[in-house]
Every structure is written in structure tokens, then in C-alpha cells.
Image (cartoon, rainbow, N blue to C red):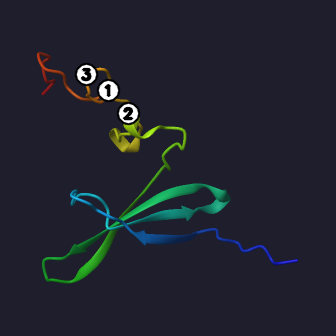
Amino acid sequence: MAEQYDNTNSFALFKNDKGDNESRPDYTGNVTLEGGKEMRMACWIRESKSGLKFLSGRLSEPMPKDLDAPNRGTGPRGTATKVSENGYGDNASVEGQDVPF
């Protein structure tokens, strides 16, 4: 019988197709943390003021797999938002309403 591989604290990153959106991460993937918790990983290629290239990254909760594509969105701190009837996300301002700042 094959030995089970422990992938705790391991990750894999894959080159991301950014399309026409430059703010999308250059690489995405998954990481398995202690206790088996799965997290989504996103990395961007950055350049320091001195010209040194480096990777900058972020961990977030994975997107629920039961969301269908038209209703996907990202709200504050990676929370899911739904698109309302007017085409805006729940956190978006609607014409005619005051902005609180």
C-alpha cells in the first residue's frame, strides 16, 4: 500500500491568466495549514524601488463551490457578495443615495 503524503504547510502556485485585468494575481493556488485547513493563495510579482523583483502574497478563505458565476464577487475581507437586481453588489452605492464620507 502506498504511503500517505502529508501536505501540511505545503502549497502549489500556478500562473494565472490575467486577461485584461492587471490587478488580478500573477499566480494563484492553495495551501494546507496545520489542522487540515485549506486556504486560497494569491501572489503578485512586484518590483522594489531599487529594481529588485519579489513576490507579494495574500491568503484568503476559499470561494464556496456552490456559488454560480454571475453571483460571484468579493466584498470586504474576501467575503462573498451577491449581485442585486440593479446590477450592483450589496456593498455598492446606488444612485441618489448619500455616500457616508
Q: What residue type is labelled 3?
A: Asn
Q: At which x and y percent is residue 44?
A: 30, 67
Asked whether, in this view, residue 97 is left or right of residue 4, the answer is left
SS class of the residue under badge 1?
loop
Cα distance between the residues tagged 2 and 1: 6 Å
Query: Residue drawn 30% across and 30% down?
Result: 89
Asked whether, in this view, residue 89 is left or right of residue 62, the answer is left
* Mark with earlier residue (2, 3): 2
Taking depth in this image into account, of 94 and 54 the one nearest to the observer is: 94
Which callout, 3 or 1, points to the residue nearer the camera?
3
Q: At which x and y percent is residue 73?
A: 36, 40
Kindly check if marks 2 and 3 are in contact, taking CB atoms under 8 A apart as contact: no
Residue picked out by circle 2: 81
View extreme (top): residue: 96
Kindly check if marks 2 and 1 are in contact, taking CB atoms under 8 A apart as contact: yes
Q: Quadrant of residue 51?
A: bottom left
Taking depth in this image into account, of 68 and 50 the one nearest to the observer is: 68
Q: Which amino acid does label 1 sit on?
A: Asp
Is the residue marked by circle 1 packed among few (<14), some (14-19), or many (20+) residues within 10 Å?
Answer: some
Residue picked out by circle 3: 86
Is the residue marked by circle 3 packed among few (<14), some (14-19), or many (20+) residues within 10 Å?
Answer: few
SS class of the residue under badge 2?
loop
Which callout, 2 or 3, points to the residue nearer the camera?
3
Quarter placement of the N terminus: bottom right
Quarter placement of the C terminus: top left
* Mark with earlier residue (2, 1): 2
Cα distance between the residues tagged 3 and 1: 10 Å
